[in-house]
Amino acid sequence: MSFVKKFGAIYKTDLKLLRRDPMLVYSVAMTLVLLLIVRYFRDRVGVYYPLLALLVLVFIPMIFGMLPGFMMADEKEEKTVQALQVIPISSETFLAYRLTWASIATAILVAISPKILDIEIPRKGLLAIIAFFLFEAWTYGLMIASLSESRMQALTVGKVLGWLLFLPPAIKLIVVWRNLSTDWSEFTAFLPTYWAYKLFEGIPKADYNSFLPGLAVHAVWLFVFVWLFKRRVL
């Protein structure tokens, strides 16, 4: 079987799933709507705008990680993932296909987000954010696929993980808003999104000291769920 035919078989499955559940496509459009809503309220939220901007940016890897995650959960429920074993491709190649288009979409939307939100992010900072968000999109998709056996389970897992990954910037927003003496968000440093916030906070000061430790945290999460996915799904 040729390379094109191998991926054509998987591609047909993807189109079938997207046609059956247009909510997955609508969720992408909703991300753009959220960016525009936050931009509209920029002058009204004042100093809280950077944190609100980050909160909505965190949605991007969540949404685009959710799409392949739900697709793979559907395939597990319908037992079509077993049929993929007939196609002579490695598990690594299958994962690369599943996550490549989500990665491209994440990178493009994050790249244009500063224009939509009307915020200044230097090129180096934008590339660093994209790197973090690519890891997060991959991890989020693998979380849903690995921990779910059906579409209903995937929805539940997605909600729980979404709230969990939302915690660091949300707690930081409360700390700034209430002017608390203790930065309680530091207790969420084991989560990838904590380091996305730290990086976002340091970019205006050209401080990228959080990039390497943040990259390490992202890599650990990704490694764990790649291993779990290969063990439980493929």
Image (cartoon, grey):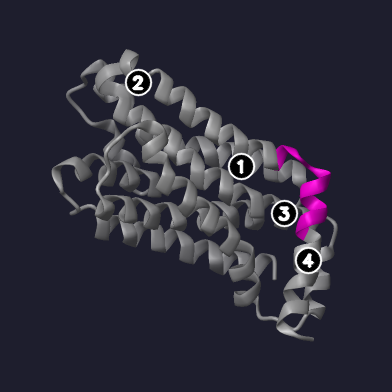
Q: In front: mark 3 or mark 1?
A: 3
Residue 164, image x and y in percent?
48, 38
Would you name the residue on which mark 1 appears? 158
Would you name the residue on which mark 2 appears? 42
Three-letter code, disc 2: Arg
Q: Is residue 41 visible?
A: yes
Three-letter code, disc 4: Val
Mark 3, other Cα within 10 Å: few <14 / some 14–19 / many ≥20: many
Would you name the residue on which mark 3 appears? 71
Q: Secondary structure at mark 4?
A: helix
N-term mark: 3 or 1:
3
Q: Secondary structure at mark 2?
A: helix
As measured in the structure, the alpha-carbon distance from the residue carrying label 4 to the one carrying label 2 is 45 Å
As measured in the structure, the alpha-carbon distance from the residue carrying label 1 to the one carrying label 4 is 20 Å
Query: Residue 81: which disc?
Result: 4
Q: Taking 37 as reference, is 93 above or below it? A: below
Q: Taking 171 as reference, is 131 above or below it? A: below
In the image, what residue occupies the spot 59% across and 70% down?
96
Q: Are marks 4 and 2 in contact (CB under 8 Å)?
A: no
Residue 228, image x and y in percent?
58, 65
Which quadrant of the structure image shows residue 154? top right
As measured in the structure, the alpha-carbon distance from the residue carrying label 3 to the one carrying label 1 is 13 Å
As measured in the structure, the alpha-carbon distance from the residue carrying label 4 to the one carrying label 3 is 10 Å
N-term mark: 4 or 3:
3
N-term mark: 1 or 4:
4
Q: In this view of the protein, which residue sits in the foreground, 32 or 83? A: 32
